[in-house]
Amino acid sequence: NAGVTQTPKFQVLKTGQSMTLQCAQDMNHNSMYWYRQDPGMGLRLIYYSASEGTTDKGEVPNGYNVSRLNKREFSLRLESAAPSQTSVYFCASSEVQGAGQETQYFGPGTRLLVL
Amino acid sequence: GQSLEQPSEVTAVEGAIVQINCTYQTSGFYGLSWYQQHDGGAPTFLSYNALDGLEETGRFSSFLSRSDSYGYLLLQELQMKDSASYFCAVRPQTGANNLFFGTGTRLTVIP
């Protein structure tokens, strides 16, 4: 099991460029998530997908779009990158177990620098 | 909404015990989770408290008191490899009920 994989690991963009961050999981999880992490800010939810075919906005969705391509894959697109989008992006998938416990499994992250 | 507060930094000596607190303001949640993240790495799940009280997993224990809106992670016999950031998180029972993370505590273990 690879778990959650993300590509690319690193990316440098110029302001206004677009790119898509790819994420895939092989754990047959229904729910998938995109977070960004900035120093001192913890993990902030950008978008999530509770199941194949559905997506919803999280805490900081502006400037991003997502696609839940199938149960395995959940991509994040920046249409016109801005320096404020410089961050580390994590994809996660989750399963809900007994007593309401939700365990999230994170990918290795994508480090994005927008110049 | 949800609010989870943690100290931003904690320093402790190798072999000692350290407690990382998490105080929260949230209306109804399933339980309190803890995640560990090493520098440059991804967050990984550590523990979950569905009920009040102490849960022990090896050197790590986690505690929840819903009446006090408070929880903590206790790390015993600290090792250098425990230097990392630790995040508490809750899953609300209403709304989107996704995990909501605190801002994290950076633990530095010194010799």
Image (cartoon, coloured by chain):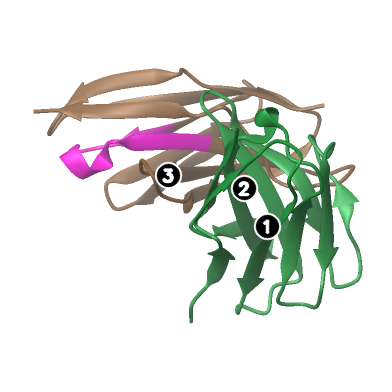
**Circle 1: element type:** helix
Spatial CA span between label 3 and label 2: 19 Å
Q: Which residue is mark 3?
A: B36
Circle 3: residue type = Gln
Circle 1: residue type = Ala
> What chain is the brown one?
B
Please say if B107 is above or below B96. above
Q: Quadrant of the N terminus of chain B?
A: top right
Residue occupying the far left of the picture: B111
> What chain is the green one?
A
Please say if B66 is above or below A113. above
Query: Residue B11, position in %: x, y?
Result: 26, 20
Q: Which residue is mark 1?
A: A99
Question: Looking at the picture, do discs 3 and 2 lie on one chain?
Answer: yes
Taking the image as shown, residue B35 lies to the left or right of residue A7, namely left
Q: Residues within 10 Å of mark 2 (few under 14, many from 20)?
A: some
Q: Which residues are magenta?
A: B73-87
Q: Is residue B76 magenta?
A: yes
Spatial CA span between label 1 and label 3: 21 Å
Q: Which residue is mark 2?
A: B50
Query: Residue A87, position in %: x, y?
Result: 58, 37
